[in-house]
Amino acid sequence: MQDSLGRDTESQPDQTGSATPEPARSGLLQRARAYLIDLRLPTKLLGITLLFVMLAEVLVFVPSIASFRLSWLQNRLESARLASLAAEASKGGVVPAMVRRELLRTAQVRAVAVKKNDRRTLVLPSDVQLEVNASFDLRDMNPDGFWNQIGKRLDLIGDALYVFVAPPSRMLVVYGRVQTGNVASASDDFVEVVLPEEPLRADMIRHGLNVLGLSIIISIIAAAAVYLTLIKVLVRPMIRITQNMVHFGENPEDPGRIIEPKMRGDEIGIAETELASMQTQLNQLLHQRKRLADLGLAVSKINHDLRNMLASAQLISDRLGELPDPSVQRFAPKLIASLDRAINFCNDTLRFGRAEEAAPRRELFALLPLITEVADGLGLPHKQIDLSVNIPATLQVDADRDHLYRVLNNLARNATQAIEGQAGGGQTSGGGEAAQGLIAISARRDGRHTIIELSDDGPGVTPRARDNLFKAFKGGARKGGSGLGLAISAELIRAHGGEISLADSEAGAKFQVDIPDRRAVAAG
């Protein structure tokens, strides 16, 4: 239907756009895409396998049908040549009408002409006038040059496919070389035949159906073989890994849910091995955190009761401070300070209720009195251990006093225990007394940093302990040690923006504490 301007109006939507199919088409595509996404892996694999096998069969079918057409036409040419030879053997070169019709029927052609010695002769003419619709020259099937040969093959494929859509009454003329034995003549002689295309189409359809049936059988067998192989080699192991991941995620604390890797050296085996390793590490980490949580609860209960005991000890120490004895007056303030520090530490632990330490309350103070307080708390020096302190009286450090006390107390206590453990192992001096040890503490300023070094001449740190130093429950440097002291010290120093490390030493152990000033931390 056309309007006054001759425009086609049947396929145009109205002004409201209600006739446009785009929304429906878009919804259909979305549903199809969602359906494909939701398919299981084996179904997708089967579909992809069938698709590519059928594609391979199509790539085989097209050249096959072109080759069949070429052979069919060449067979007609050969039959026409033989019929022409029979016609030429007739007396006087005249072929009776009945014989001519029989020869044409046997050759399945309508007319035959032969060119020999530059002379073209209509050997077997048709009884009726023929209208030729297309012509094909089969004389030069192997042109020179690679691309020319490719072009010739593509032309043959195009001609073969056009047979299925061409008009059914089409008449063809075909040219071919005269055969001498099994070899085509190299001269310009040729055989020319006129034949209908309908028998060719019928034979090509039968051949195509045969190839199609064979292709379907081959496709099913090949797809099934590929599918079953991939299912066993790839899909089932992947499904096993996926199911194990889901199963393990339901209860990662159950070690029985950890995947057991198969003895495979390919990527699937590597994936199973790595997955088992990650699941094992996660399982151990969860168990460790559970133990730490239980330990934290126990520590909180102990801490609560310990705080009450320390409060009672603080009352008693206050009364001791009232005694006029000089020794009591000398040690009572240190005892009271130690009890106050212990009570504050217990309160902070209960207040925060977490593994992280409280933020440092930094101040600028002299370092030497703190070192003296640490030494007095450990009873240093004594007859087994000497103490060497090399710290200027004017040196000041910008840090949390209680935090730094805990760090230095942990380091000095570890050094003391290491030396006493070495002496208890049987090392004695010439007088029969236990061997003497030495703890040396020094400090210096380095720009905006305070460097504190604490060393001893004990047995040192074992290589195994070095690998996990400053890690709780892993970095114990002595037998029976938990490594908590070094882990706590490292955490406290990191809270200051500093670093604690094990320095190289010829004997014993040497720890270095680097504490930057607040200005250095702010400067980044």
Image: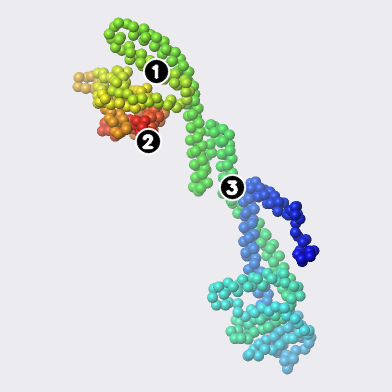
Residue name at image x 50 percent, y 31 percent: 286
Identify the residue shown where x is 69% and y is 51%: 26
Q: Against 425, is 324 above or below?
A: above
Which residue is label 3 attached to? 235
Q: Identify which residue is drawn at 63% across, 82% down.
A: 177
**Can you see residue 174?**
yes
Depth check: give the residue in front, 519 or 368.
519
Q: Position of residue 400 (x, y in %)?
A: 37, 25
Which circle's residue, 1 or 3, is located before the other in the chain?
3
- Mark 2 or mark 1, which is nearer the start of the sequence? 1
Residue beneath disc 2? 523
The 10 Å Cα crowd at callout 1, few under 14, some 14 to 19, many 20 or more, is some
Disc 1 to disc 2, how far (Cα)? 34 Å
Q: The residue under label 1 is which amino acid type? A: Ala
Give how far across and how far down residue 491 sits, in percent: 40, 29
The residue mark sitting in front, 1 or 2, is 2
The residues bearing labels 1 and 3 have C-alpha atoms spaced at a distance of 62 Å
In the depicted structure, whether residue 232 falls above or below residue 145: above
Quadrant position of residue 52 = bottom right
First-in-chain label (3 vs 2): 3
Q: Is residue 302 left or right of residue 166?
A: left
Asked which quadrant contains residue 136, the reply is bottom right
**Residue occupying the far bottom of the picture:** 92
Three-letter amino acid code of the residue under disc 3:
Val
- In the rendered image, which quarter is residue 69 located in? bottom right
* In-image side of 138 versus 405 (left or right): right
Q: Which of the labelled discs sits on residue 342, or is there none?
A: 1
- Kindly report the distance in space between the C-alpha atoms of the residues bearing marks 3 and 2: 56 Å
Q: Is residue 87 left or right of residue 228?
A: right
- The type of residue carrying mark 2 is Ala
What is the basis of the colouring in this image? Answer: rainbow
The reply to whether dot 1 and dot 3 touch (C-beta < 8 Å) is no
